[in-house]
């Protein structure tokens, strides 16, 4: 890939490209990189005031006890006295920002918007790119990404490489308080399907958002191509979600100027002396894990294992 400083400056879509869209077709521009982004749909989103979300936790004593309690069978023993203590330095989550400036020539939007609104399509596709980047950051960001915020005790490895039913059961044992969904690369889901089928327990499917999903123990396996694959291996995550469940929640700031949906805004920045109109596209977001046992990860998931099946002949 060329160094960014060597790339030519592109101020707006070319007149030829805009003319083709306006006169040669009546369909919207198709972009193959757009994905369903199930993670965003399945996460509960919390509106954050002031751009900061503080997670206050109860503190345990040196013996791992939160409240000193006494079970009494008879007699009148002296009862313990105690109180619930809190962490004095709770973790704070600050919203991250994804931004870009969309530039369009007014000649393009004026002359070639008869069949399809050129500005609307430029905004739509730019917003799609922002959302794709957001899903990537929710998984891979060094500070808030799910893959990088797992507690060491909640991280395990596969028994033999390919993802087996035993491996997913082990994940469930770590996130057993209302697990919501598995999240992994589509190739890992296919690999699990092969292993489960070989065991004679092909995973059933359920329908969410009008699409079928494989499940295990009733928990859906949600695909995302933003999970990295390195040397034929990837990871499988299991999440509990929601504030009331002390799970994983998405964070955003709603009500910003130019908002087109919660936490996402498009603001007109003016037109320069070259007739280039600029629009600032901004997404404010973050991710918070409210309980250490709300997230677990299965690492070293091999996705390249296949089986040969021998069928009896008549």
Image (spheres, helix red, strand yellow):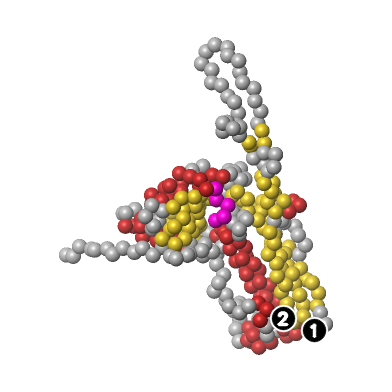
Is 225 a magenta residue? no
Q: Quadrant of residue 80?
A: top right
Tell me residue 123's x, y (percent).
68, 72
Q: Position of residue 66 (x, y in %)?
A: 60, 31
Which residue is depicted at the point 39% across and 65% down?
A: 304
CA separation, marks 1 and 2? 10 Å
Task: Give the answer, above or below, for where 281 lies relative to 293.
Answer: below
Front residue (pair 275, 208): 275
Placement of 12 over or under 91, stated as above or below: below
Direction from residue 284 to residue 79 in the image, left or right: left
Q: Residue furthest top?
A: 75
Q: Residue at left 69%, top 87%?
A: 15
Who is closer to the viewer here, 288 or 278? 288
Crowd tier of the residue under label 2, counting other residues whose Cα lies within 10 Å: few below 14, some 14–19, many 20 or above: some
Q: Nearer the viewer, residue 258 or 69?
A: 69
Instruction: Tell me residue 61's x, y (percent).
Output: 61, 32
Q: Is residue 147 magenta?
A: yes
Q: Which percent across, then down, holds residue 76?
A: 57, 12
Q: Residue at x 49, y 50 (%)?
A: 155
Give me the residue at 74% from left, 69% from top.
Answer: 280
Magenta residues (range):
146-151
Q: Which residue is mark 2?
A: 11
User: Dot 1 corresponds to which residue?
Assistant: 274
Which residue of the protein is positioned furthest toward the bottom in this rendering?
A: 16
Regarding mark 2 in the picture, which secondary structure is present there? loop
**Disc 1 and disc 2 in contact, CB within 8 angstroms:** yes
């Amino acid at each position: 890939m060329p160094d960014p400083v060597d790339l030519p400056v592109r101020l707006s879509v070319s007149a030829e490209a805009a003319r083709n869209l306006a006169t040669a077709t009546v369909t919207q521009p198709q972009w193959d990189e757009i994905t369903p982004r199930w993670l965003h749909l399945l996460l509960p989103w919390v509106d954050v005031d002031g751009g900061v979300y503080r997670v206050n936790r109860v503190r345990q004593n040196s013996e791992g006890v939160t409240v000193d309690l006494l079970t009494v069978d008879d007699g009148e023993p002296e009862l313990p006295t105690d109180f619930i203590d809190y962490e004095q330095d709770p973790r704070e989550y600050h919203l991250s920002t994804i931004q870009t400036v969309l530039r369009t020539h007014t000649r393009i939007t004026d002359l070639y918007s008869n069949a399809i609104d050129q500005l609307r399509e430029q905004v739509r596709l730019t917003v799609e790119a922002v959302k794709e980047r957001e899903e990537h950051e929710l998984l891979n960001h060094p500070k808030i990404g799910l893959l990088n915020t797992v507690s060491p005790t909640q991280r395990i490895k596969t028994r033999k490489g390919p993802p087996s039913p035993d491996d997913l059961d082990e994940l469930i044992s770590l996130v057993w308080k209302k697990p919501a969904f598995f999240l992994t690369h589509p190739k890992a889901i296919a690999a699990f399907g092969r292993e489960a089928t070989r065991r004679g327990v092909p995973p059933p499917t359920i329908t969410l958002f009008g699409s079928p999903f494989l499940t295990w123990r009733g928990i859906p396996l949600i695909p995302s191509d933003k999970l990295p694959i390195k040397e034929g291996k990837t990871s499988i995550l299991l999440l509990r979600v929601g504030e009331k469940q002390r799970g994983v929640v998405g964070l955003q700031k709603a009500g910003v100027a130019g908002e087109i949906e919660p936490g996402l805004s498009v603001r007109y920045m003016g037109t320069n002396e070259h007739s280039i109109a600029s629009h600032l596209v901004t997404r404010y977001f973050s991710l918070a894990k409210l309980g250490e046992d709300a997230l677990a990860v299965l690492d070293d998931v091999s996705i390249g294992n296949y089986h040969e099946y021998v069928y009896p002949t008549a």
